Amino acid sequence: MRVLLLDADQGVGRSLESELNGTTQLHAAQTLSEGLRLVAQAQWDLILLDADFSGAGLELLGRLHADGGPTPVVLLAQNPSMDLAMEAIRQGAHDVLPKPLPRGRVREILLGIEEVRRLRPLPQAAADDAAIVGASAGMMTVYKSVARAAASDATVLVLGESGTGKEMVARVLHSRSRRARGQFVAINCAAIPENLLESELFGHEKGAFTGAIGRRIGRFERASGGTLFLDEIGDMSLALQSKILRALQEREIERVGGSSAVPIDVRIVAATNRDLQAAVAEGRFREDLFYRLAVVSLTLPPLRERGADLDLLASHFVAFYAREHGRPVRAVAEEVFAVLRSHPWPGNVRQLRNAMERAVVMSDGEVLLPQHLPPDILRPASPRTPAQEAGEMPLVTLEEMEKRMIVRALRETGDNLTMAAERLGIHRNTLRRKIAEYGIEH
């Protein structure tokens, strides 16, 4: 590997030569002009840059990062402060090291860079994090249905668990339709109090109720010529359901407190995580409105049923948020995917997106590692058995308990021996011995 040292202190180069011991080509520059020449002349695996290099260390760091080069840059500082470290990271530094350099740290960084080359590279970041990603059979069915429905003005009902991406599908239906030039207006019917929801949907006239100091245009009118997305429509009262049905049938509305009909030209896309057919059977949802909404019905599969889509989505979100937050992440360790696959994802794609954004923000290098994931993903709460609820644990031998704890630690850390050993409070070599002793597959 090739390392470039930009530091006027020749002693740093001598200490590095003895540490690297000929396994790495080390080149050094003591002046700014020489350093710029070497940077431009060759490809480097790592650049070590003194913060005081020719009085322009941070400026040079910013230039190297702005040029978009893939070479990681480590900033060296005699007395690194929090302000310096934060500014260096903001400028794109891979790491900040004190001088004299900690023994073995540069070699660790080089090993990490070599590791990146065998890891799964990130895809090109999409324009936004709301892109629909996936190639599972369930999602392919959704894609085809969306493509057919988008070409029409038919009302669409999108079904699926919370967090599966129902609003994203609604936005695609709008953007691929002839109404794309109109507005996409969304409203969460479960998030607005019942006494205010009617006014939000249909608008009101001045004096319609206490506080109505002027005319208000509702969501139906605002979406004229475009698409109105009614999210969580299964939580709407029967009285409002009747008014929604009339608006769909008559293509007109009445503002609260008004006496004249207002014509509307709007496409409706509705969504819910509830079982509307069961709600119809129980009298909680109007049957005629259900059939009016479900001209086209799409069901989004939960994340746990989408197989390899989990890896695709995780990579997509990491690539997007690395660019969004200016982080240097270029690859994801396979252990991360192993941890993600072991999680049940009750919050579906929304939960995964939030977890990967947090991981990117907490990352400290080019490789996303399991320790960057949120604690609830690394250590998910296990469902409690009736015996546990009663405060009792089934009796097992100490050896069996130890084996179970090792298996659990390996599973929850994605078979990362170092992390599993730390979690168990034992040395990595001790963990290796016990894995062999208990015949645990690893």
Image (cartoon, helix red, strand yellow):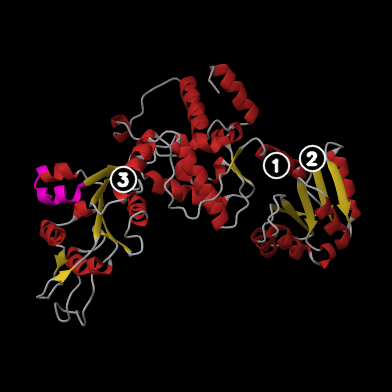
Q: Which residues are magenta?
A: 281-295
Residue receiving disc 1: 113
Relative to 168, residue 66 above or below: below
Image spot of residue 80 (x, y percent): 73, 60
Residues at marks 1 and 2 touching, judged by CB atoms closer than 8 Å = yes
Q: Which residue position holds label 3? A: 148
> Which residue lies at the image location 90% right of the left edge and 52% below the top edge?
11
Q: Provide the secondary structure element on which disc 3 rests.
A: helix
Q: Which sits earlier in the primary sequence, circle 1 or circle 2?
A: 2
Looking at numbered disc 2 in the image, what kind of residue is underneath it?
Answer: Met
- Residues marked 3 and 2 touching at CB (< 8 Å): no
Pick whichever, 107 or 251, lies toward us. Answer: 251
User: Mark 1 Cα within 10 Å, few/some/many (few <14, many 20+)?
Assistant: some
State the separation of the CA atoms marked 1 and 2: 10 Å
Residue 346 placement, left or right of 20: left
- Closer to the chain start, of discs 1 and 3, is 1
Mark 2 highlights which residue? 1
